[in-house]
Amino acid sequence: MESTFIIAFKEVLREQFIEQNTVEIDGLGQFEVKHREQHQKKFESGKVVLMPPADVVEFKSNIKYSHED
Amino acid sequence: MKIDKQKLVELLVEKTRMEEEEVRSQLDQLIERIIGAAKRGKALEIREFGLFYFDESGELKFDPSDELSTEISFKYAGMKPVELKPERDTSFPEAEEDDLEDFDFLSDINSDDSNVYPGTEEEKGVFADQEKPAEKKKSIPLKSSKFQAKKRSGSILWVFAAILVVAALVLAYLYFIGSLATTTQQPSPAVTQVEPEALNDMSEDDQSSSAGESNDVQPSETENQGQESETPEAEIEIESSVEPPEDIIPSDPAEPARETEVSSEEQPLYGLQGSVMEEANNGYSIVLHSFPEEANARTAAEELTRQGYRTIVNSRTVANRTMWRVSVGQFETLQDAQTATQNLPAPYNTQNFIQRIQIN
């Protein structure tokens, strides 16, 4: 596999994510950028932290694999 | 918008300038390698992109890399988790007050209980009920005295607070008067920008009459202000969320400009200041402005270049809208760029984001 292809693949997907586009690749899965609101997170120690908002990539795939196979 | 495999192949063809068939073949190979590695129980990492693996339930998962996460969430770059104080339990103070009342130290001092035989456990059990009413009686006068003491300390606090407020108001008034006096004494920055010819005129007028001085200065001041309002600076302030106030930008651009001249001969490949190196365009840059109009971006870039920064202007289409980004510096890694943001003047040091360098 050519490294130029891998570099281009990363760049194209990154650009699409920045533009909030969903990328669906047959045989692999779907990448989607979701906005996560700021929220409070409570740790076991009792410490409460206000997490900042963020845009995150979510990946969903229909491909399932059984480790027993 | 949704990008399917066909559209992705088209974009990859455009990017790589390879044949469509070849791109398709490369993409299929990549998918096979990802799934093949995952099936072997291994995770396949694409550097600076992310990690593909099968989790315990047998689902294909993807963990984006830190670099990808930062670039996608660039709008919130610099925002860090904030620790919150736990909410105060309002039921506590009452309990504390009761505890204090039980600890009746006055009665402890007045009575000789400390020397009294404490008694066995059985005796305590017998007399416990008899002793309780007496304890309650003692606590009543203490409560009232405490209340009075609290009231007294409260009123003292109020008086103290009032004195502080009055003192603060007096100081603020004095500061206001002082600042008024200094502004009237010192010449305004606009006056210093008057051309030498105008200054000569002013000095001539000074000789003729001191009363005419202010009259001569005023028109030149208003002229300058008029010129400033015509420049695109005013527009930049409205359109750009990261444009700093004028007083924050280093007012003396001569020094950085000199640095540029010196460093352009032997400047390193990557860095914040100097001139843009074509060989360093494979790295990262810190975006300080984003404009819908190219002219405004160019004006902002000129100002940053004048301050000695390596300045890059490029366009990006975000949500079907072309934005002109003005970025500074060329850095080999994302971390280097993040570190360099700390060397920028406020508010650039907090209002920025990092992107891969793209030259249009």
Image (spheres, coloured by chain):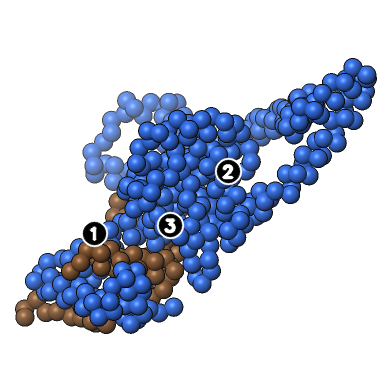
Chain colours: A brown, B blue
* Amino acid found under the numbered disc labelled 2: Glu
Residue B326 location in percent, x, y? 51, 52
In the rendered structure, the answer to whether residue B78 lies left or right of residue A61 reads right
* Amino acid found under the numbered disc labelled 3: Ile
Looking at the figure, which quarter contains the N terminus of chain B? bottom left
Give the chain letter at badge 3.
B
The reply to whether callout 2 and callout 1 are in contact (CB within 8 Å) is no
Point out the tag, 2 or 1, that comes first from the N-terminus: 1
Give the chain letter at badge 1.
B
Residue B178 location in percent, x, y? 75, 25
Q: Which residue is at the front of the view, B350 or A15?
A: A15
Instruction: State which mark lies toward you, 1 or 3.
Output: 3
Q: Quadrant of residue B270?
A: top left
Q: Which residue is at the front of the view, B235 or B44?
A: B235
In the rendered structure, the answer to whether residue B256 lies left or right of residue B279 reads right
Instruction: Name the residue furthest top.
Output: B207
Q: Residues within 10 Å of mark 3 (few under 14, many from 20)?
A: few
Q: Which mark is residue B303?
A: 2
**Badge 3 and badge 2 in a common chain:** yes
Residue B95 location in percent, x, y? 44, 47
Residue at image position (9%, 76%) is A67
Point out the tag, 3 or 2, that comes first from the N-terminus: 2
Quickly name the residue at label 3.
Answer: B359
Residue at image position (48%, 33%) is B261
Q: Which mark is residue B47?
A: 1
